[in-house]
Amino acid sequence: MAASPAAGVSAQDAEKELRPKGHLTIENPNQLTAETAKKIYDGIADELAKAYAMAREATVEDYQSWRRLNVGPYLSATHGNRYVNNYANARAAGYGDLRPGERLAAGSVLAKDSFTVTAEGEVFAAALFLMEKLRPGTRPESGDWRYVMILPDGSYFGDTEGDNAALVAYCHTCHKNRASTDFLFQVPKRFRIKE
């Protein structure tokens, strides 16, 4: 039985209140050493890739063969206290070296896979976060970025250019703080791969 909205609140407003305003956050994540995080990821990487592939999202097929931008998984508070890895396709080659005012080329895709580890040590696959640079002028209000979140069972949580767009609109709300560098955050310095 569906809950009815409170008196004086429209169904549309009630639905807005239920939408996440950001990532669901792991309140007490396990603080892993770099070696332990890498070992866990190495053990589940194939499982993650197979699960995300069920979404049939062509832009991230074989994303783990792309250039990896971090030396190992790191805890990302901005992605819900999940351990993440960053990958960039060949079109996004300049990602790590962007200067203010520069932009990545259309077709650039950045993928961030993730997993969680509870305080008790339980490991869970988590979402794949995707940014795809669209043709110039396609979506000027987002810097021509498409944001997608794929759940670890291969289902779409949302796609700013498709289903459940409102559920992932908060992605750009966060990324717009980096407008000068094409709306992109960088991998934390201590986790960056030295080139």
Image (tube, rainbow, N blue to C red):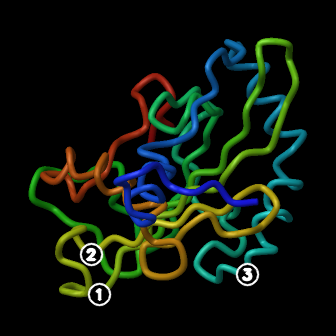
Residue carrying label 2: 144
Crowding at label 3, few (<14), some or many (≥20) Cα neighbours within 10 Å?
few
Q: Amino acid at mark 1?
A: Arg
Which residue is found at the position 64% from the left and 83% from the top?
58
Q: Is residue 134 above or below residue 73?
A: below
What residue is drawn where x is 45% and y is 71%? 165
Relative vertical location of residue 165 with respect to residue 195 in this rendering, above or below = below
Q: CA distance from mark 2 to mark 3?
A: 22 Å
- Secondary structure beneath dot 1 equals loop
Q: Residue visible at 12% across and 52% down?
A: 180
* Crowd around label 2: few <14 · some 14–19 · many ≥20 (10 Å): some
* 106 vs 193: above or below: below
Label 3 secondary element: loop
Which one is in front, 194 or 115? 115
Work out whether 123 lies above or below 30.
below
Q: Quadrant of the N terminus?
A: bottom right
Name the disc covering residue 8, or none.
none
Judging by the rendered image, the residue that carries numbered circle 1 is 135
Residue most extreme to the left: 101
Measure how far apart labels 2 and 1 are at the Cα level: 7 Å
At x 50% / y 55%, what residue is drawn? 5
